Every structure is written in structure tokens, then in C-alpha cells.
Image: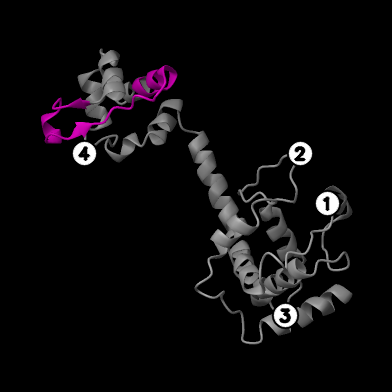
Amino acid sequence: MFKLFYISILLIIFTACGDEKPKPTLNGKKLMQSKCASCHNLNMPPIISDDELAPPMMAVAFHISNFMQPPIETQRVAMATAFVVDYVREPALEKSYCDKASLERYGLMPSQKKSVNDDEVEAIAHYMFSHFTQENLSKIQKAQANYDALSKGEKIALKYKCLGCHKKDKKVVGPSLQSIAQKYSNDKQSIKKSVKRGSKNRWASSNGAVMPAFNKIDERELEELSSWILTHK
């Protein structure tokens, strides 16, 4: 009951004019990176480590948001933001929503009022609750699953940005992967040489465009990439 009353008072204070946006001059993402990243992991999904100083920021955002009890759902972010602004300034056990195990592991967050002001915390909180959402997490996980399903060769092609100049089935700056595979179907070494050393004037259709040398690619990657290119024939 105390927490609900306490949050309701904060909500009235910080949302007297509605669910206001942070001041446009303040970048919540950059502030989070500069003010929070030394203790909180900002990855989504988070990277968990045994020596982390504080819970991952995604966990913090999900936890706080889930514990809010707004009168109407549209006030959830405003209520969560008000809580964060107050808690960062004056943390206390009676305000905390952390479970006992988390408090024992991380301890109570020290006050940050000397290192970040209320406007900065508000901008950070707005970014936190708009970025660390289930919808965004699902999109990231789907993209990661799609990437994991790619062959090793295609991952290497993405790593070195090969598909910026070579599309699978049409010419862009350089020839398509299908054209390369057809021309060098029995000559993988020529493909490897072109990747490693670069080339020029091998394709009239490229109008003199230069293939840059990727001389830092290692032999394992070069083999995987060349084999993948040949699959397009």
C-alpha cells in the first residue's frame, strides 16, 4: 500500500502536464551509455557475468515496468519514469522492487544525485522504457535467429560487407555472385586471389570499378567465403 501511494504521488508530481517527453536537447541513449554503462550491461538481450556490479539494464526496465500499477495503462511509462528519477536520487530499501536475492548480490544502489541531474535521469528513463521493451527484444531475437541460420560463408560476406557491391542474382557495383560462380566454377583460387589482393578490369560490366583488397581476411574465412560464392552457380 505504501509503495502504491508513494508512486501515485510521484506520478502527480512528474506528470502534471501529461506524459511529457524528455527535453529535446538531452539524448537518453547517450546519457545511458555515459552514466550507466560502467555498472549496468546495456545489451539486449543482456550479457550476464559473474562479476557484474549491477543488474542488466533490460532486467531493470522490465522489472520496474511490470511492478507499476497505473490507474490507466497509458500512464505506465510516466509512473515508471517518476519512480526512476526519485530512486536514482534517493534510493532506499522501502522503495526498492528488487527481490531479496538481487539485493544480496548487488546491494542497494548508491545515490547518483551528484553525478546526474533529474533532467538527465528523466531522459535516460524515457529511453530505457521505450527501448527495453518486449517488442524490441522479440525483433532482436528474431534477427539473431535469422543470422544464426546463415551459412558460415554468408556470415563472412556480411562481416566484410561484400553484399554492398555484389548481390546474389544481379549486378550492382560489381558482378552478381551467380556470375562470379559461373565464371570461376572450377577456379576457386582465382576467387580467393581477387578477394585477398583485389582486382580491376576483370569485368567489363563493372566500368572500371576497383575490387579492394581484403588482405586482413584469414585463410579459414577466405576458404569459407569462396566456397559459399561457388554455391551460387
Instruction: Determine the secondary structure under disc 1.
Output: helix
Instruction: Determine the secondary structure under disc 4.
Output: loop
Q: Sequence-wise, which precedes: disc 4 or disc 2?
A: 2
Report whether 69 appears left or right of 180: right
In the figure, residue 186 lies in which quadrant? top left
Q: Circle 1 sits on which residue?
A: 102
Q: Sequence-wise, which precedes: disc 2 or disc 3?
A: 3
Q: Which residues are magenta?
A: 199-226
Residues at circles 3 and 1 in contact by the CB criterion of under 8 Å: no
Amino acid found under the numbered disc labelled 2: Asp
Q: Sequence-wise, which precedes: disc 1 or disc 4?
A: 1
Please tell me which residue is depicted at 28% across the width and 37% down the height of the picture. Answer: 167
Q: Which mark is residue 50?
A: 2
In depth, the one of 220 and 224 nearer the eye is 220
- In magenta segment, residue 231: no
Residue 58: give x, y in percent of width and height: 66, 54
Instruction: Determine the secondary structure under disc 2.
Output: loop
Residue 73: give x, y in percent of width and height: 67, 74
Q: Which mark is residue 173?
A: 4
Q: Sequence-wise, which precedes: disc 3 or disc 1?
A: 3
Can you say which quadrant of the picture contains the N terminus?
Answer: bottom right
Amino acid found under the numbered disc labelled 3: Leu
Q: Circle 3 sits on which residue?
A: 11
Report whether 99 appears left or right of 89: right
Q: CA distance from mark 1 to mark 4?
A: 54 Å
